Image (cartoon, helix red, strand yellow):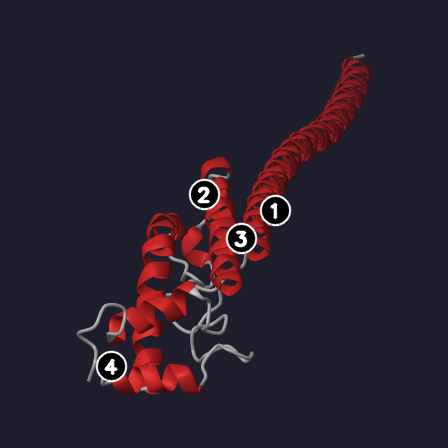
Amino acid sequence: MLGFLPGASEQDIIDRELANGDLNSRGTNFADRSGSWNWQDSFGAWMAGSSKEKVLAGARAKRDRQLADKYDPLNKATAASLGPLTANYKGVSGKSIAEIEAEQSLDTGRATALQSAIANNVDFDPTSLSATATKGDIYGASGKATRDRTESKEETARLRDEEETKRQEKRYDTQLESQYLREDRRDARSELLRSQEKSDALELRRDNMNLQYAQMARRDRMDAKDRKDKNIMMLMQGLAGIATGFTV
């Protein structure tokens, strides 16, 4: 009604409430103290064609704009470094300055931890994190990635050593088998040679026996012939004697 008078408009009242710090810490209501809003303020608002509710709404909106102008730029810069993570800071409305700064401090710490892990640990995968991961979660995930990588290398080395051991054992077994095979063949040749020698010896003995039998048979034949020849000679001599006797 009298808002046209200097200092009597709704905006003037809003500015005074903010300047006097008459809102509570979150800007959601007037402060719970004497003088933050009294009958004189209510009368002044009525004179300006406004009300306590309208003044509160206007003061709250202006407060939020002022705080957003101050804190939003930092949030934008921090959000760019958070990568896949969700920022704790989501605006100023209904929050105290302490709460706003606490959220931004958490986000700054998370962003710093994330960028440090990315820069210093090639095994770290940011996408493996929960969107709400804390600074501790980030460092923990980075450490786990390092341990996993180390364990993977150790496992790879262990498997490689096992494969090499198996290869060497197989090579040794193959060499041992070849050695046994050569020995078996040598033993088989030796056995065959001994068997052949025995066979040759038996054959030689058989040949010698056959030769002896043949010689004995030959001697027997010769002896028989000699006896026959002697008998014939004796017979002829006897006949000759008989013929002589008849002649005389």
* Mark 4: secondary structure: loop
Q: Nearer the viewer, mark 2 or mark 1?
A: 2
Tag nearer the camera, 4 or 3 = 4
Is there CB contact under 8 Å for labels 1 and 4? no
- What is the CA distance from the residue labelled 4 to the residue labelled 3? 55 Å
Separation of marks 2 and 1 at Cα, in angstroms = 19 Å
Horizontal relation, residue 226 to residue 6: left or right: right
- Residue holding disc 4: 48
Residue 42 horizontal/vertical position (percent): 37, 86
First along the sequence among labels 4 and 2: 4
Among numbered discs 1 and 3, the one appearing first in the sequence: 3
Pick the front one: 103 or 25: 25
237 vs 120, left or right, is right
Label 1 Cα crowd, 10 Å radius (few <14 / some 14-19 / many 20+): few
Q: What numbered label is drawn on residue 138? A: 3
- Spot occupied by residue 147 in the image (x, y as percentages of width and height): 61, 46
Corner quadrant of residue 157: top right
- For the N terminus, the quadrant is bottom left
Pointer 2 or 1: first along the chain = 2
For residue 92, above or below residue 2: above
Residue under label 2: 115
Q: Residues within 10 Å of mark 2 (few under 14, many from 20)?
A: some
Residue bearing the label numbered 1: 147
C-alpha distance separating marks 1 and 3: 14 Å
